[in-house]
Image: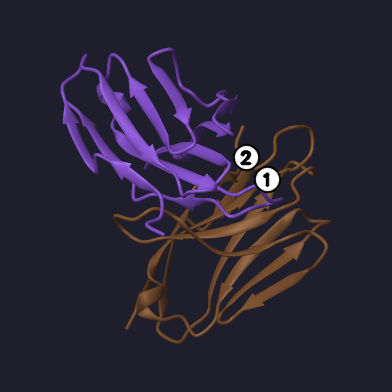
Amino acid sequence: QQQVKQSPQSLIVQKGGISIINCAYENTAFDYFPWYQQFPGKGPALLIAIRPDVSEKKEGRFTISFNKSAKQFSLHIMDSQPGDSATYFCAASSHSGGSNYKLTFGKGTLLTVNP
Amino acid sequence: DAGVIQSPRHEVTEMGQEVTLRCKPISGHDYLFWYRQTMMRGLELLIYFNNNVPIDDSGMPEDRFSAKMPNASFSTLKIQPSEPRDSAVYFCASSPLDRGATQYFGPGTRLTVL
C-alpha cells in the first residue's frame, strides 16, 4: 500500500513561473515531511523539510505548505529556473513506535523548466 | 567531508552471478540505509542499520538479497544469484542521530543484470 501519493508525475513550467507539486499521506503518525531533489546521475539531496506544528516553511524560492487536517503537503517553487529542472520527491516519516528515521517516499515528479 | 561513497558506480553482470555493492557512510553518522530506485517502483527502502545493527529489513525483496555492516565505516549489499529484474540504481544513505535527521545519499550504483 502506497503511503505517500505524489502528483503530478511530470511538470513543465516556463522560466519565472511557479511550480507546484502535491503530496498526500495516510499514516497520521507521520511527523516529519522532507522534500528531496534529484539531478540525473546523482543521489537525492534534501531540499527543505517541515514538521506538522507549522503550516508553512519558506527557504528562498522554495516553500512547503502543510495541511494537517487534509493530510496533504505541497512544494512551491517560485520564479522557477532552468537549473531547477530535476526530479522532486516528497517523503514522510514517523518517530514513534520504533520506526525512527524510516522515510517513505512518493513516486517523484519530473520538473522541466523551459528557458 | 567526502560524503557517502559507493562502489562500484556501474556494474554489469550476467544472470546468476553474485553482485556485491559497497558503501562508506559519512563519518560519525549512526544510521545507514540501502535503497533501490526503479522507474516502476520509485525509491524503495531495502534495509537500514543503527550503530551497525540491522533494524528493519522488511524491504529486502527476497532471500537472494543480504546486507551487512561489519563496522561503522562500511556496509555491503549482496545479491546472490542476481536476476535481470534486479537491474536498478542502488543508493546508500547515512544519517546522524537526530530526530528527523537528514539522510545524505551517495551517488548510487547502477546495476544491470543481463
Q: Amino acid at mark 2?
A: Lys
In this figure, which residue is indicated by the disc labeled 2?
A102
Q: Amino acid at mark 1?
A: Ser
Q: Is residue A95 above or below residue B81?
A: below
Horizontal arrangement in the rendering, residue B38 relative to residue A94 (left or right): left
Percent across and percent down for residue B32 are 51, 39
The residue carrying pointer 1 sits among few (fewer than 14), some (14 to 19) or many (20 or more) residues within 10 Å by Cα, namely many
Asked if marks 1 and 2 fall on the same chain, the answer is yes
Q: Quadrant of residue A41?
A: bottom left
The residue carrying pointer 2 sits among few (fewer than 14), some (14 to 19) or many (20 or more) residues within 10 Å by Cα, namely many
Seen at 42% across and 41% down, the residue is B92
Q: Colour of chain A?
A: brown
Seen at 60% across and 67% down, the residue is A75
In this figure, which residue is indicated by the disc labeled 1?
A93
Describe the element under mark 2 as helix, strand or loop: loop
Percent across and percent down for residue A17 are 48, 83
Horizontal arrangement in the rendering, residue A67 relative to residue B31 (left or right): right
Q: Which quadrant of the figure contains the C terminus of chain A?
A: bottom left
Q: Which chain is purple?
A: B
- Lower sequence index among marks 1 and 2: 1
Q: How many marks?
A: 2
Describe the element under mark 1 as helix, strand or loop: loop
Q: On what subunit does the disc labeled 1 rest?
A: A
Q: Quadrant of residue B113?
A: top left
Q: Quadrant of residue A81?
A: bottom left
Q: Is residue A38 above or below residue A115?
A: above
Seen at 51% across and 46% down, the residue is B94
**Is the Cβ of the residue at disc 1 closer than 8 Å to that at disc 2?**
yes
Q: On what subunit does the disc labeled 2 rest?
A: A
